[in-house]
Image (cartoon, rainbow, N blue to C red):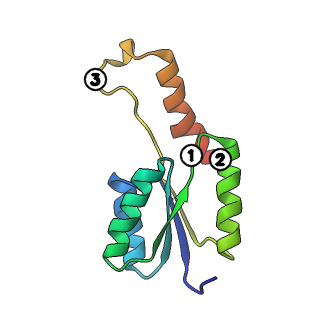
Amino acid sequence: MTNKKQALVTGGNKGIGLAIAKGLAETGMAVWLGSRDRGRGEEAVAGLNAQGLDVRLLEIDVADDANVKRAIAELSSEVDALHVLINNAGIIIDTASPPSEVRMEDIKATFEVNFLAPSG
């Protein structure tokens, strides 16, 4: 275990989450980059590690309770405390259709991740 402050950024493999992960790591924190897609997460972590930043992958799908519990157990075995949590994970499934034409299952999936998962 390390004495560094620990941060977790969900949805950290691209966009705003990746920028936040990079920014936290640049301050000297150890950052856990949360990604539901292992491949994209590994690619993001490799890019940040290549810049000399202390970033590690935590595979996590915030919409899957069992997956979240597994990720918590993994993180708990590696660190004593989490000092910063950025719940950035979010999805948008259909950007091409007007809202009135989006499938109900896509609306439900979006709501599940964007509104319910961060509170779980």
Location of residue 16 (image quadrant): bottom left
| Residue under the point 38% across and 77% down | 53
Q: Is residue 120 visible?
A: no
The foreground one among 66 and 105 is 66
Left or right relative to 22: residue 90: right
Left or right relative to 42: residue 120: right
Question: Type of residue at label 3?
Answer: Ala
The foreground one among 9 and 45 is 45
Q: Does dot 2 land on a helix, a strand or a loop?
A: helix
Q: Residues within 10 Å of mark 2 (few under 14, many from 20)?
A: some
Q: Does dot 1 land on a helix, a strand or a loop?
A: loop
| Residue under the point 37% across and 60% down | 44
The foreground one among 30 and 100 is 30
The residue singled out by tag 3 in the image is: 96
Residue reaching furthest bottom? 3
The residue singled out by tag 2 in the image is: 67
Question: Type of residue at label 2?
Answer: Asn
- Quarter of the picture containing the N terminus is bottom right
22 over 103 or under it: above or below: below
104 over 7 or under it: above or below: above
Left or right relative to 98: residue 17: right
CB within 8 Å, label 2 to label 1: yes
Q: In x, y percent, where is residue 55? A: 45, 71
The residue singled out by tag 1 in the image is: 61
